[in-house]
Structures are given as C-alpha cells and as structure tokens.
C-alpha cells in the first residue's frame, strides 16, 4: 500500500515562509512526477507546482518567483518552499505522485492534505 504524508503546514503571517514536505512510502518501484496542488476555501483544487524525475518543474503563474518545488529521489520526498506568502495562498495543500507501485503500472496517488493559513 502506498501512502503520501504531508507535513509542515500551519498558520503564518503575510510575507512569511513555510516549507511543506511530502514523503511517499510503501511498495514503490519508481516515481515519475511529484507535485503540489491546493484547494482554497470554496474553490476547486488547482495546480501549484510539479517536478519530474529528471528535475523539470512547472509552476502556477500565481506562485512563480515565490514558491520552489524540489525532490529527494533517494527519500521519495518532495518539498515546497513557500516564500512571500499572501492571504490568497490560504488553502488545503495536497501532495500528488505519479508512481509505479505493486500494481505494475503508473498510478496517481494523493496525500490527505494539509492546511496552510496566511493571516495576520
């Protein structure tokens, strides 16, 4: 069974920083893309950032220049460094991984989500 566990969320003031982590565990043979999505209150889930196994990254326009995604393939872990946070970054953040598990084919997996609140 594969699990994605997020950590590092919480309450931060505008202009502050947070670092999210996502650790994948279980029967994992390979991970292609890892990513972060978020769901603001009352809105749909949206892409924040993704990173492929060879390090190619993609960011939502709203976070470019403020957020940085990284991964440690040896630890099956992805990170999201969030700087210059704004109130509109408030959301539940979800980790996603496209990985090869015991099923024998690549599947999407999701974490349980972690709250990030930006407020003074």
Image: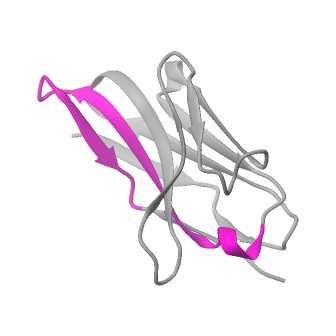
Q: Residue furthest right?
A: 15
Q: Is the image coloured rainbow, by chain, by secondary structure, or in one colour?
A: one colour
In this rendering, the answer to whether 64 lies above or below 27 is below
Residue 92: percent from left, percent from top: 52, 68
Residue 74: percent from left, percent from top: 51, 18
Q: How many marks?
A: 0
State which quadrant residue 84 falls in.
bottom right
The quadrant in which the N terminus is found is: top left
Closer to us: 7 or 95: 95
Q: Residue furthest top?
A: 54
In the rendered image, residue 96 lying in the magenta stretch gets the answer yes
Q: Residue furthest front?
A: 61
Left or right: residue 120 compared with residue 36: right
Which residue is located at x 15 percent, y 27 percent?
102
Residue 58: percent from left, percent from top: 57, 36
Residue 109: percent from left, percent from top: 30, 45
Left or right: residue 11 compared with residue 116: right
The quadrant in which the C terminus is found is: bottom right
Which residue is located at x 78 percent, y 45 percent?
65
Which residue is located at x 51 percent, y 25 percent?
75
Closer to us: 39 or 22: 39
Left or right: residue 84 compared with residue 73: right
Which residue is located at x 47 percent, y 20 percent?
53
In the rendered image, residue 88 lying in the magenta stretch gets the answer yes
In this rendering, the answer to whether 9 lies above or below 50 is below
Q: Which portion, as a residue range, is magenta?
A: 86-112
């Amino acid at each position: 069974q594969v699990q994605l566990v997020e950590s590092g969320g919480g309450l931060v003031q505008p202009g502050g920083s947070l670092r999210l982590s996502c650790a994948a565990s279980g029967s994992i043979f390979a991970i292609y893309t890892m990513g972060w999505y978020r769901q603001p209150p009352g809105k749909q889930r949206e892409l924040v950032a993704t990173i492929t196994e060879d390090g190619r990254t993609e960011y939502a326009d709203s976070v470019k220049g403020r957020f940085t995604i990284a991964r440690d393939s040896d630890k099956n872990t992805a990170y999201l460094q969030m700087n210059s946070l704004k109130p509109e970054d408030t959301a539940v953040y979800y980790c996603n991984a496209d990985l090869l598990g015991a099923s024998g084919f690549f599947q999407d997996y999701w974490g349980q989500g972690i709250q990030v609140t930006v407020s003074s």
